[in-house]
Amino acid sequence: MKDFSTTRSGLVLGIESSCDETGIALFNGRIGVIVAESLHSQILLHAPFGGVVPELAGRDHIKYGLRLIDSTLKSAGISGNEIEAVAYTQGPGLAGALLVGAQLAAALAYAWGKPTIPVHHMEGHLLSPMLADPAPAFPFIALLVSGGHTQLMRVDGVGRYGLLGDTIDDAAGEAFDKSAKLIGLPYPGGALLSRLAANGEETSFAIPRPLLHSGDLNFSFAGLKTAVANEVRHLTGTALPARGAISAPQPILPDDHPRRADLAASIQAAIVDCLVAKSVAALKRTGLQRIVVAGGVGANQKLRESLNRAAEKVGATVFYPPVALCTDNGAMIAHVGALRFAEAKLDYSVNVKPRWDLAELRAPTPCA
Amino acid sequence: MSAVLAIETSSHVGAVCLLRDGVAFKEIVRDNTKLSAWVVPAIDRVLRSAGLSAKALDAIAYGTGPGAFTGVRTACATAQAIAYAVNKPLQAVNSLTALASVFSTAYSSYPQFNWAKEEIKVILDARMSEAFTAGFIRASDKSLRMVSDTALQPIDQITFSENAAVLGSGAVIVARRMKLPEAVVNAITELTYTAENVWAESIARIAAILVAQGDAGIDPLTAEPTYVRNNVAKTEAERAEEARRDTFVRSEESTV
Ligand SMILES: Nc1ncnc2c1ncn2[C@@H]1O[C@H](COP(=O)(O)OP(=O)(O)O)[C@@H](O)[C@H]1O
């Protein structure tokens, strides 16, 4: 199996452009170290639109992609010819955004005469806790919680994943962001909501915890958003639209409303309760003793505290990726590229996969 | 010896061309091929057929568009990455200019077009009932000068005369809509097809002239496509304003 022992530098360049972050990194697969990285976030670009505008994302990726690649290589003092392979996010994500990073990767690798490694974005998140110190050993449970995903997986090794539970509607990050919007926070409001929640009382509003006792490991967050919308109608004294009326605009809580922090705390507690309960159930069901948390919502302090406490009770340890790797980034892509170096190919045909199920992945197999 | 690689993927046509000492090695697809999957392997085949590696190129050029958003980024990303990787100059050529310049070589087969007197108009289908347009005049040294800059226009407002020098996917649509004589529609269709077939070659020729004139080109790090269509989404404030206006109109109506 092809590995780094015979390579000169052991360096893999990683390119991430699946959504609203352009992330570039150089990872040394021989010694397992991030050598250099750079990131450009588009959060401010999309904020006025209340969500990511796919076309603007694509435009921004091409504006910054090569510049970030150049500054990453320069900061490491590395020339392109010295790297061993170029890894890029092939999916899932926004097609137009994925295409920019993938096309840059393919053309660079071609011109440098190096192989490419297409990477699954969620595998990047899933394995990013391996970059923490201490790193979890296989097998472990992974709680994937981001703006687009809420999954519990059993991880037995690279590419050996079993889906244990999934959301049946909204993702946890989506629940945070949609609720945040209703209480008057700018997009994406997840982190802002959790800051606000610190000054609130989490038992003040009865926000539902859907599927909490469903007996399976699935999640549901759509009903939670509806409950928050109703609370906001109450608090602002707005009546529900009459049946058959043209839908009235959803009221937004003004930012000086006295109950705002209480509502934020209650929302956060509901989401966190669901995530923690199912995580513990997954540990019990599998008998595993390690759980990793990956994805943007993993940055949530309340989730970390509750999960740590709950895991301790069942004798399990929780692992988190380094904070810088919680949001989208190039290092997690370069890292998976290094783990899948055996699959590197002189293949420059770009075929992005906007939809791509993590369960389709297999353990790395050397190519002919 | 000079070797210029050109890439054009702004529309339904994918074209790459290596112009080596005036000889064109090229590949073109127009059958709904996914251009991102096709383009780098096609470049590899074209370079191989000439026995060159990317490192041996003297310059890389790309059609900037305007055109399909994803397509214009495909050509730009590919060209800027190769130019950066092999450290060679990058030339950005307007895709409409490249099509128009084919007139200079192909006109004699189409005596019905009054190309020498009139403006040459390139009209490209931009979907959503719009077209990208640009106008050119052929100077005495046979070079083209752009006289009306690339613009986005409602396609049903575009008209031209029977013997006007027009080409492009949008020109064919307009000619049909105007019910111009079948011979004219056919001539425009054929000329457009011919021009598209040498689209990348035309970009390479324009770039080769620039390179020969000592033009250093653009910095690969700041290369971008040409979009022209820029209004791609409404901000929340704009949507709220529209909703407000809407409600206002509705309540006005209901009081009538
Ligand atoms: N402290 C936090 N509390 C709750 N949610 C958070 C926090 N920080 C980030 N998020 C949420 O994480 C999501 C982004 O995570 P990320 O992994 O980048 O997701 P994706 O790639 O799916 O957009 C957003 O929904 C954001 O609101």
Image: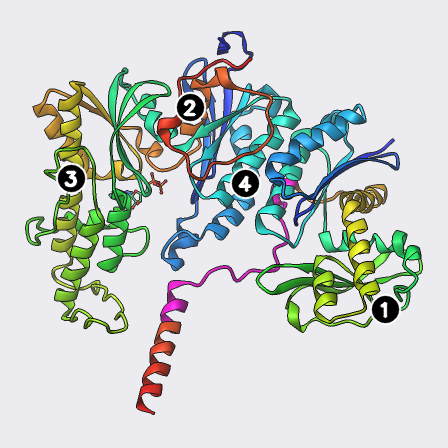
The residue under the point 25% across, 71% down is A248
Graded by Cα atoms within 10 Å as few (under 14), some (14 to 19) or many (20 or more), the crowding at tag 2 reads many
Of circles 4 and 1, which is in front?
A: 1
Q: CA distance from mark 4 to mark 1?
A: 42 Å
Mark 4 Cβ and ligand 1 under 8 Å apart: no
Residue on which the image places disc 1: B163
Residue on which the image places disc 3: A274
The local secondary structure at tag 1 comes to loop
Of circles 3 and 1, which is in front?
A: 1
The residue under the point 90% across, 68% down is B117
Q: Is residue B110 above or below residue B256?
A: above
Residue B94 seen: no
Amino acid on which disc 1 is placed: Asn
Residue on which the image places disc 2: A336
Graded by Cα atoms within 10 Å as few (under 14), some (14 to 19) or many (20 or more), the crowding at tag 3 reads many
Viewer-proximal residue among A191 and B200: B200
Amino acid on which disc 3 is placed: Cys
Mark 3 Cβ and ligand 1 under 8 Å apart: no
Of circles 1 and 2, which is in front?
A: 1
